[in-house]
Amino acid sequence: MSENAELHTPPDAELLDSYSRTVSAVAASLTPHVASVTLSRGGGSAVVFTDEGHLLTNAHVIGSGRRGTVTFSDGSEAPFAVVGSDPLSDLAVLKARGDAPRAARLGDADRLVVGQLVVAVGSPLGLAGSVTAGVVSALGRSLPVRTSRAGRVIENVIQTDAALNPGNSGGALADSAGRVVGINTAVAGFGLGLAVPVNATTRRIVDTLMVEGRVRRAYLGVVGTPAPLPDDIAERTGQRAGLRVVEVVPGGPAHRAGLRPGDLVLTVGRERISDAQGIQRQLFAEVIGLDLPITVLRNGAMVDVYARPAELTAD
C-alpha cells in the first residue's frame, strides 16, 4: 500500500461514518425518553412527550387496560394510568406517576421526504432501548383500523424500512435531528414498518385525549374513491379531483341529505375534497349535529346539499 493510500478514502466509507454519527447522536438523545410498557396482558413502547410525565403510545398496545408499568432506559420504573385512548387513530396517552424523563422533541411528519433518514427507538421483543435505522420508504400510505362497530383510515402513514418487531409499537420514529415524527404502529411485512405521523392532526387528537379522554368524531356514512374532474369543471374550479361516491349507508346522514352513488364530491364544509382523508379531517366533534354544506357534481351539474353528521361510536 502506498503512503498516500489513506488520503483516498472511498466516498462510501465517508458516508457510512457520517451516517453512523447521525444515528448514534439520535439514539443517545432520544433513548432516555422512550419507555417499555408492561400491562397484565402484553405491552409495547411509549414516548414521553410532556415534562409532566405524559407518554404517547398506540391504542392497540393498551387495549382495554387502564394501568401498568413503564420502564425507562436507565432501569427506573413508574406506574402509569391511561389518560385516554382513541382506537380509530391508534393513539393513546398515559400518565406516569413519580419521576419521568423530560419530554422528547416532537417534529412534523408533513415535512418528511422519501429517502430521508429515520431512527426507530423502542422495546422490540421486550428489549428496552433498542435502536434501528433506515429511510422513509414511502409517504401517504393509508392504514385501515377497525373496532367492533366502526372503521376508519389513518391518513398519511409513514412507511419505513427501519427494522420493527413486536414490542416496537408505541415507540418513537425520529428524524436525523432527533425529533419524533411518528409513533411506530405496525409491521407491514418483511423489511417494512408503518408509523402514525406526528403532525397537526395528531396533535389535535392528543390534546383532545388529554382533556376529554376520548375523541368524538362525526359520521357521514359515505364510501368513496378518488376520481378526476371533467376537464371543463376542472378548468372552471381549478380543482383536479374529487371523491366519487360508491356507497351511501342507508339511513345515515349522507343518505338523509340526498347523496347518491355516482355523485362526485367537490367540497365539504366549503373545503375542497380529493380523497376520503379530506373528509375525515373535518369530521370532529364540532360538526356533530350541524348542517354541513356539501357540493357534488351530478349529471354534469353542481348540486349543493346539507348533511347533519351524527356521532361515530367506536365501540
Image: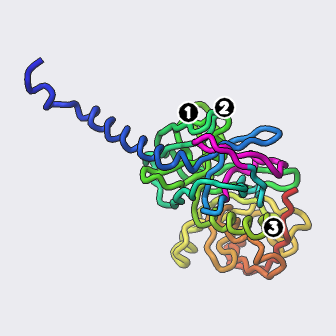
At label 3, the amino acid type is Tyr
Instruction: Report the side of 278 relative to 135 (left or right).
Output: right
Q: Residue furthest right?
A: 251
Which one is nearer the viewer's eye here, 143 or 169?
Answer: 169
Label 2 to label 1: alpha-carbon separation = 17 Å
Q: Would residue 59 be counted in the magenta stretch? A: yes
Is any part of residue 144 visible from this angle? no
Looking at the image, is 171 positioned above or below residue 246? above
Q: Which residue is mark 2?
A: 125
Q: Which residue is mark 3?
A: 219
Identify the residue shown where x is 84% and y is 58%. 314
Instruction: Report the side of 273 relative to 97 (left or right).
Output: left
Q: Which residue is mark 1?
A: 191
At label 1, the amino acid type is Gly
At label 2, the amino acid type is Leu
Q: Quadrant of the N terminus?
A: top left
